[in-house]
């Protein structure tokens, strides 16, 4: 398998998931600037949206969208425990909030990080960034109220915790969570120390 990545981006989630499943894969590391420029020929050929993560499987087929990749890996390697067991109440909780994170929370970064893709007027861009950052904080607070303990889905860690650990590294960053989303902050701190997570977090978010 070949995974297209960019340090500090959402591709870190799939690096961690693949490592968690003890799978071998080739990393093609691009800079954030290259991903934003959308001119890497190999990545364009695999994914016309020029996004990371993009995972090219051994048979040549392509997987994109981090949640889809996580669910697919969990189906293939259920013993790894990326998500709670099939049929459990914890799995229903996990799937609900996994989709919330990728369809509701994550797009606030898409719009706020690249406002020029959506608006041409400078003042409108500024307003878009501000509104998305406000929405993002509201979403994080909602997620905080929905967290179980000690991990997001209860007794065992899952990829939900990894999403929290990675995405809390982005704006408004970890210090904001200490006062506004303390349950998520505690989860993020624990995630950093998981052996299946620590190497990728160190590589993607060096101190």
Image: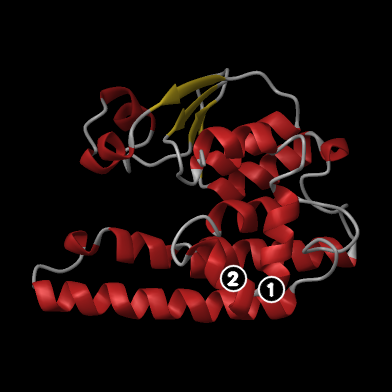
> Tag 2, which secondary structure?
helix
Compute the Cα span from label 1 to label 2. 6 Å
Q: In this view, does 77 lie above or below 157?
A: above
Residue 63 in view, yes or no? no
Residue beneath label 1, please? 182
Image quadrant in which you'd find residue 203: top right
- Does the CB distance between marks 1 and 2 fall below 8 Å? yes
Q: Position of residue 63 (x, y in %)?
A: 53, 36
Dot 1: element: helix
In the image, what residue occupies the spot 73% across and 77% down? 146
What residue do we see at 60% from left, 79% from top?
A: 180
Colour pattern = secondary structure
Task: Say whether residue 81 is left or right of residue 128.
Answer: right
| Mark positioned earlier in the residue sequence (1 or 2) | 2
Q: In this view, does 97 lie above or below 163?
A: below
Q: Residue at x 21, y 32 (%)?
A: 39
Q: Quadrant of residue 43?
A: top left
117 or 135, which is in the foreground? Answer: 135
Task: Count every numbered label the image shows and give the total.
Answer: 2
Q: Is residue 39 left or right of residue 200?
A: left
Q: In which quarter of the image is the N terminus?
A: top right
Query: 92 left or right of 116?
Result: right
Residue 3 shows in the view: yes
Measured as percent of width and height from the top left, residue 11 is found at 50, 40
Q: Furthest-left residue in view?
A: 121
**Extreme-front residue of the structure:** 207
Residue at label 2? Answer: 177
- Which quadrant of the structure image shows residue 72? top right
Q: Where is residue 110 in the image (x, y as percent from the top left)?
A: 36, 60
> Which residue lies at the image location 33% right of the left edge and 39% below the top edge?
32
Position in image of residue 137 (x %, y %):
50, 77
């Amino acid at each position: 398998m070949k995974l297209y990545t960019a340090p500090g981006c959402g591709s870190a989630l799939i690096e961690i998931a693949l490592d968690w499943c003890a799978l071998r894969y080739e990393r093609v590391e691009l800079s954030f600037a290259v991903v934003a420029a959308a001119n890497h020929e190999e990545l364009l050929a695999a994914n016309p949206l020029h996004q990371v993560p993009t995972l090219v499987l051994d048979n040549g087929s392509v997987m994109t969208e981090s949640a889809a990749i996580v669910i697919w890996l969990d189906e293939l390697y259920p013993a790894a425990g990326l998500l709670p067991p099939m049929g459990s109440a914890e799995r229903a909780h996990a799937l609900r909030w996994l989709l919330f994170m990728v369809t509701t929370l994550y797009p606030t970064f898409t719009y706020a990080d690249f406002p020029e893709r959506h608006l041409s007027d400078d003042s409108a861009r500024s307003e878009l960034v501000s509104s998305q950052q406000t929405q993002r904080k509201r979403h994080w607070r909602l997620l905080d109220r929905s967290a179980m303990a000690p991990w997001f889905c209860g007794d065992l860690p899952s990829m939900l915790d990894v999403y929290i650990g990675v995405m809390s590294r982005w704006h408004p960053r970890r210090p904001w969570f200490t006062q506004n989303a303390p349950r998520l902050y505690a989860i993020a701190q624990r995630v950093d120390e998981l052996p299946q997570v620590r190497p990728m977090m160190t590589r993607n978010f060096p101190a």
